[in-house]
Image (cartoon, rainbow, N blue to C red):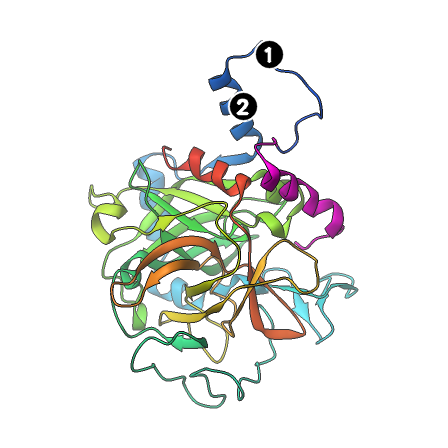
């Protein structure tokens, strides 16, 4: 689930940033015999892979019934799906061979040393909530309220026969049913799609579900993620079923989303980290300025953040107003390097992510 050839893997994204180049298109190929609208639709489809999830009312009821309080409590952070670490990097779960210096979205067992940063985490005791939002923190409990406490939620899913958790956020869409999360929270790279996929907005302590549960009906990922687990495109979007006949957007509201935004700048990241020192029961946030990947392994941007596995897919927002809890989603929590547990990386929302959204928002 990591880049095997970072230079080649990054090339399609760079091309996309230079203009409306179609990923996977044959250089120089002419399409003069096709109307512009058809060309645009075909280009979008070339960037998106989709999957039908819960089919019909009976299947939707089965999925929601699957997630008993006991199963939710026992679900693992998805960082434990197929990776372990010995401090040097990711290890192949079968051979034990070193794969790379990346670890999927904080899924490392070693606890981070956070004694020197702007943080509320203290090892050996539960982290405390900050009295008011901070402009710089690598992991504090969000206690200010606002829209983000409703639009952000936990995701429960099954992959390879095991139950896992991620994070996600509702996003503005024509269907009023859309959430955005990490691609690896929807599909295991070239592998299988997640099953029993359920979103619980505003998840609270002790399994509180103030706004209900929403099963997935259709899933979408960027094609480069589906083809090769390209971390540059670790983006997934899910169209949900209604709950009690109501769309999720009508119940909890939504956040805006933007693509091809200016790099860098102040950002707030949210999620439900579940590995120690967190327990997955509370909304946590990181805040600070974005910076480019110093290792040049990806085109992603990094945010100072000690959140752990379970925060995967949680939204990163620019132009965020801490008082209202509203902002514009421009990335999400994706991975960490195993030798730097204080920095989370998120994919740049370029043309591929835009195509996923354009397809998913009307599903």
* Magenta region: 1-22
Residue 142 image offset from top left, x and y in percent: 33, 73
Q: Secondary structure at mark 1?
A: loop
Graded by Cα atoms within 10 Å as few (under 14), some (14 to 19) or many (20 or more), the crowding at tag 2 reads: few
Q: Is residue 128 within the magenta segment? A: no
Is residue 151 found left or right of 238 in the rendered image? Answer: left
The residue at the point 32 percent across, 44 percent down is 172
Can you say whether 356 is above or below 201 in the image?
Answer: above
Q: Which quarter of the rendering shows the C terminus?
A: top left
The disc placed on residue 189 is none
Question: Pointer 2: what residue?
Answer: 42
Between residues 325 and 93, which one lies in front from this camera angle?
Answer: 325
The residue at the point 38 percent across, 35 percent down is 55
Q: Secondary structure at mark 2?
A: helix
Q: Which quarter of the rendering shows the N terminus?
A: bottom right
The disc placed on residue 32 is 1
Disc 2 to disc 1, C-alpha distance: 14 Å
Is residue 353 found left or right of 209 in the rendered image? Answer: right
The residue at the point 53 percent across, 35 percent down is 48
Query: In this rendering, does residue 106 appear at all?
Result: no
The residue at the point 66 percent across, 71 percent down is 338
């Amino acid at each position: 689930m990591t880049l095997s050839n970072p230079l080649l893997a990054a090339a399609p994204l760079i091309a996309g940033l230079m203009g409306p180049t179609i990923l996977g298109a044959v250089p120089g190929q002419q399409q003069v015999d096709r109307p512009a609208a058809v060309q645009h639709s075909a280009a979008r489809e070339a960037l998106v892979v989709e999957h039908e999830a819960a089919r019909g009312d009976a299947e939707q009821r089965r999925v929601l019934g699957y997630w008993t309080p006991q199963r939710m409590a026992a679900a693992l952070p998805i960082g434990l799906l197929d990776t372990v670490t010995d401090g040097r990097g990711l290890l192949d779960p079968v051979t034990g061979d070193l794969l790379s210096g990346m670890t999927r979205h904080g899924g490392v067992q070693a606890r981070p040393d956070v004694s020197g940063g702007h943080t509320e985490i203290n090892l050996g005791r539960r982290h405390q909530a900050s009295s008011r939002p901070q402009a710089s923190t690598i992991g504090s409990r969000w206690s200010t309220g606002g829209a983000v406490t409703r639009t952000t939620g936990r995701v429960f899913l099954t992959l390879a026969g095991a139950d896992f958790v991620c994070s996600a956020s509702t996003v503005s869409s024509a269907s009023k049913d859309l959430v955005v999360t990490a691609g690896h929270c929807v599909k295991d790279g070239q592998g299988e799609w997640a099953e029993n996929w359920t979103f619980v907005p505003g998840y609270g302590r002790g399994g509180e579900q103030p706004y209900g549960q929403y099963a997935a009906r259709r899933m979408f990922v960027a094609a480069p993620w589906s083809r090769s687990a390209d971390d540059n495109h670790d983006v997934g979007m899910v169209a949900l079923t209604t709950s009690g006949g109501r769309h999720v957007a009508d119940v909890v509201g939504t956040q805006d989303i933007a693509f091809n935004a200016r790099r860098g700048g102040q950002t707030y990241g949210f999620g439900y980290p579940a590995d120690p020192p967190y327990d997955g029961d509370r909304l946590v946030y990181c805040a600070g300025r974005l910076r480019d990947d110093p290792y040049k392994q990806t085109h992603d941007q990094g945010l100072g953040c000690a959140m752990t596995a379970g925060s995967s897919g949680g939204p990163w927002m620019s132009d965020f107003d801490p008082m209202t809890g509203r902002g514009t989603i421009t990335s999400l929590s994706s991975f960490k390097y195993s030798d730097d547990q204080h920095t989370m990386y998120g994919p740049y929302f370029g043309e591929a992510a835009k195509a996923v959204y354009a397809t998913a928002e009307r599903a």
